[in-house]
Amino acid sequence: MLRTTSLAVGDAEDYASVPVEDPPPRPGSRSDGRGRLLHSSAIVVLVVGLAITAALSLGARSVHDNNEDRLLNQRTREVAAVVAAALPNIQTPLGSAAVLASATTGRQTAAAFRSLMEPLATAPTRRPFVSASLWPAQSAAPRPLVVVGEQPELAAEPPAQIARVLSRALEKKSLTLYNLFAASDRRLGYAFAGAAPNPRYVVYAEASLPKDRRAAVDTNSAFADLGYALYLGAAPDESQLLASSTGGALLHGRRASVTVPFGDTQLLVVMTPYKQLGGSLLARLPRTLAALGLLLTAAAVWMIERLTRRRRQAEALAEENGRLYANQRSVAQTLQHSLLADVLPEVAGLEIAARYIAGVEGIDIGGDWYDVMPLDDSRVLVVVGDVSGRGLHAATMMASLRYSMRAYAAQRSGPAEILRGLSNLVSVRRDGHFATVLCALIDVAGRSITCANAGHPEPLIVDGHDARFIETTIGVPIGVRPNAHYDEVTTTLPRRATLFMYTDGLVERRGEALDVGLQRLADAAITNQSSLDEVLSAMVARTIPNGSDDDAALIGVRWQS
């Protein structure tokens, strides 16, 4: 800490009152002191006080500016992380649609594409796209083969421009953005052909943008005290403005910016604070210190100490806000839950419930997931998986696997075929991750399950007061070996039996044998709770009462008769 020592006002008065022996003045001379305004000691104190006041005022201004810049840069990086986390939500569905289109032919292609994209382009709330379409990769006069939602604005462009957009998507092999800001309905287009060689189709989707280029931030948002502008590209070109809190560029005030890679281009995020991020006291202090002057030198020193405490309080509040932000994991959990099923489907004859428990450490999102996919009136596909590692890449792979499984399930593939198809999509050498997956096909009327297992913990069956694990043929995890072979095991269940599928975060402990955790889970599954939802809550409370370092997923299926 920088400490400043100065002479107090009372000391100055004492010095001024000390008698000083001067040579006896000559009678009538002006050196007898009657014409002097200040003595030399008072002048020294005045000069020193003015210098200290000026130094404190300039120093306070510098501290304020540095503190505001640091806090604004920190908040801007947080916003950039949120923007970057949105890319998988856009690219993953388009990639899954491209894989599905390549894997089907004829009318199956259109039907499968509609089945996959209709929830994303026609849902009444929270839909990412207003239009999704499938285009031929090579065509002299390209037109959409299938359109879901509204007509794409791209279709109204000249054929040469359409061809350029599709060609760029084929060349880039990544998400390609197309600017439709000048259209009557402002939109941003996304084109994706996939990484497979010689793709036959290009998947294209359009997202609606605010017509007045203004998008307000919710008052309860973590960024409600910031104004923002989002540009397409790395330069603040107003013609490339996606949206802002003002409807135009941020022209005044303190600003911070950061570029975020987004598909084949970049997004520029520019932020400005609506108020002082470090508090109003720090902003007013330089003017206050400048007005105090010599007589308030001691008060200025006291204010500097108060400023230091206030600055520490502001930093402590910023750190506390960071811890709360990490604990709540606003971005991570929002993204995590957006990749999981919001509402489990209702299946006649079954009671289904699920739990997802986030790890207690860090803010990185995990790769655990579950999914329930009704295939027809009597068959349901239930899946639990766990991608190795954590972070955005793991979550991206998890989303890719989940959507791919839905695509394979739509083709009525069995559990073993689904796992074999997934083994060709992921490579631990290329992607740095692998995944364990348990895929169970449930025959509701026949009370049987057919399981295929890719390195995942075996399912648990509970019948009354008897709990046992179903033996499955465990194959290699997804991503370890391409074209991996998986065997299916069919088991018939007793009436009113309950099936539990889970990830290893529920049973594994450091320094503890796995069998101990499995037995703890089996004991926890035998409970007097009536509803399946209460049973899952009791199992979580008994297996991880203090939370776990790893994420955990648990899903239960109970036959009602």
Image: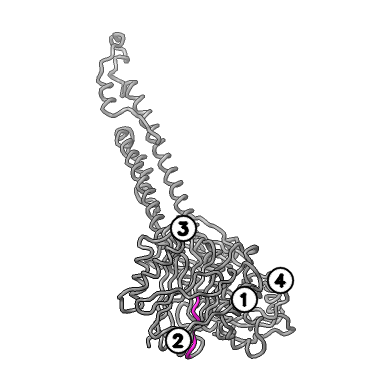
User: Is label 2 or label 4 in front?
Assistant: 2
Mark 1–mark 2 CB contact (< 8 Å): no
Q: CA distance from mark 1 to mark 2?
A: 25 Å
The numbered mark, 2 or 3, whose residue comes first in the sequence reads: 3
Q: Amino acid at mark 2?
A: Arg
The numbered mark, 3 or 4, whose residue comes first in the sequence reads: 4
User: Is label 2 or label 3 in front?
Assistant: 2
Q: Residue at x 35, y 39 (%)?
A: 304
**Where does label 3 land, which residue?**
272
The numbered mark, 1 or 2, whose residue comes first in the sequence reads: 1
Quadrant for the C terminus, please: bottom left
Quadrant for the N terminus, please: top left
Q: Badge 3: few (under 14), some or many (20 or more) residues near its Cα, within 10 Å?
A: many
**Where does label 1 land, which residue?**
420
Q: Secondary structure at mark 3?
A: strand
Q: Amino acid at mark 3?
A: Thr
The numbered mark, 1 or 3, whose residue comes first in the sequence reads: 3
Mark 2–mark 4 CB contact (< 8 Å): no
**Where does label 4 land, which residue?**
171
Q: Within the magenta stretch, is there residue 424?
A: no
Q: Badge 4: few (under 14), some or many (20 or more) residues near its Cα, within 10 Å?
A: few
User: Is label 3 or label 4 in front?
Assistant: 4
Q: Is residue 248 left or right of residue 190?
A: left
Q: CA distance from mark 2 to mark 4?
A: 50 Å
Q: CA distance from mark 4 to mark 1?
A: 29 Å
